[in-house]
Image (spheres, rainbow, N blue to C red):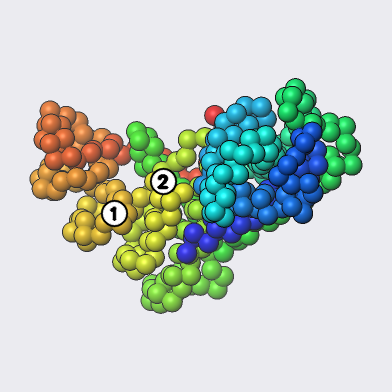
Amino acid sequence: MSSNVIDKFKDKKKKVLVTYAKILENIITLEENTLWQKTSDFAPICEGVVSAFADKYYFDNNINRHNPVEYLNDNINAVLLSIIEYYKSINKPDVVKANKNETFLISVIVCTASYVDIASNVIDGDYAETKKNFQKLLKHLNQMEILKIYINNKTLLDKLFKEVKKNINLDKKFFNYYKSPAWHNEYQIVSTDPLYYKVKFIYNIVGLNKENPKLLIKYQKAYLKDNLKISYDLLTILLMKEYIMNKEVNVYLIPTLEEMIGKELNILDIPLIKDNIRVLAPLEMYEVYSKIDNFKVVYFYRGDNDQEILSKRDIEVIVPKEYLKKESSNLEKYQELNIKLVEESIGSRITEDVICHIKEED
C-alpha cells in the first residue's frame, strides 16, 4: 500500500544521486585511480553503492544539510558501509581494503551527491544557497592531498546544477501528486506530553448528498479502501517530508474503522514510519485491538471509572485532565500494570502545510 510511495521516492532518488555522482566523478578525482578509468566503468559501482545507501540511510543524518562539510562528516560512515555492502553483494569484499584511496573517493562523491540533493530539497531546501555552499565544499575537499578537485570547471558545474533544477521540479510534482480538492488530511493535537496528532481523513466528493445517511454509508463501503489508500499515502508523504527536514518527527494517531482491521493497516509495518503512527481506538474496543499485535494502539477514554482502565494492562490511554487529578494518588497502581496515562489536550485542526511551516521555524 503506502510503502509504494516511499519505494517510488527512493527509486527516484537512486536515479538522481547516480546522475549527480556521474557528473561529480569528473570534478572530484584522484591523481591515480586504479579501480576505474572512465565513467562507464564507474557507473555500476556508483549504482550499487547508491542503491544500498538510499535504501538504508537516505532519510538519516540530514540535520546539517545547510553545511556541506558537516553533512559529509555525518554521512561518510553510512556511505562506507554501503560500499562494503555493495562489494560483498558481488563477492568482491577485498576491493575495499585493496583500494583505500578509491574507496574514499567513492564515499566523497556519493556523500557530495547526497548533500546537493538534500540541501536543495523542495521542503525546506535552498537552490541558491546550495550552489553557493558547493563552492565552499570543493575548496574544502581541495585541501585533501589524495584528491584532485576541478574547482573551476564551469561546464560541469553548470551541468550539475541544471540537473538539480530539473530534480527540484520533479520533486514538486511528486509531492503534489495527491493534492486534490476531493481529499485531504487534517491534523489535531490530542496531547502535548507526548505530542500526538490525531489524523482526520477528509473527502469532498462532488455530487454527494451529505444529508442522506444511506447514501453516505453506501459510498463509504464502496470507496473506503481506495480513499483510505490515498489518506495513508498523504500521511506517509507528510512523514517523509518531516524526515527530510530532519527535525523531530511527529507521532500520528489514525482513527479506527472496522474495515481497517487487517490488511488495510499494513502501513504500520513500513520501517521508516511505523514508529510514528499509532491506531487511536476507544477503550471499549480494547478486546478487539488487544488481539492484534502487528501495530501499536493508543486508547482514548473520557469516562471516570478507574476500573475500566485498571482491569487492563500494558496499554497507553489518553484521559481527561480531571481523571489524572482524581487518580494522582493512585499512579503506582497504573505503573504496576504498565498502564501509561496521557493527559488529553485538544487543539485546533491544522493541515500538513501548517505542520511543516511550524517545524521549519522552530
Judged from the image, the secondary structure of the residue bearing numbered disc 1 is: strand
Residue drawn at x 54%, y 53% as measured from the top left: 91
User: At which x and y percent is residue 15?
Assistant: 68, 54
User: At which x and y percent is residue 347?
Assistant: 41, 40
Eyeballing the image, is 70 above or below 346? above
* Total numbered badges shown on the rendered structure: 2
The kind of residue on which mark 2 rests is Asn
Eyeballing the image, is 216 above or below 153? below
Q: Decide: few, some or many residues near mark 2? Use Cα within 10 Å; few <14, some 14-19, many ≥20.
A: some
Q: Is residue 320 left or right of residue 78?
A: left
**Quadrant of the image for the C terminus?**
top right
The Cα–Cα distance between marks 2 and 1, rounded to whole angstroms, is: 16 Å
Label placed on residue 276: 2
Q: What residue did someone put label 1 on?
A: 281
Eyeballing the image, is 354 above or below 74? below
Judged from the image, the secondary structure of the residue bearing numbered disc 2 is: helix
Residue drawn at x 35%, y 38% as measured from the top left: 191
User: At which x and y percent is residue 217?
Assistant: 38, 73
Label placed on residue 26: none
Q: Marks 2 and 1: CB-CB under 8 Å? A: no
Question: Which is nearer the N-term, disc 2 or disc 1?
Answer: 2
Is 286 or 61 nearer to us in this picture?
61
Is 308 or 108 nearer to us in this picture?
108
Residue drawn at x 14%, y 48% as measured from the top left: 312
The kind of residue on which mark 1 rests is Ala
Residue drawn at x 44%, y 70% as measured from the top left: 225
Eyeballing the image, is 263 above or below 168? below
Q: Is residue 308 left or right of residue 231?
A: left
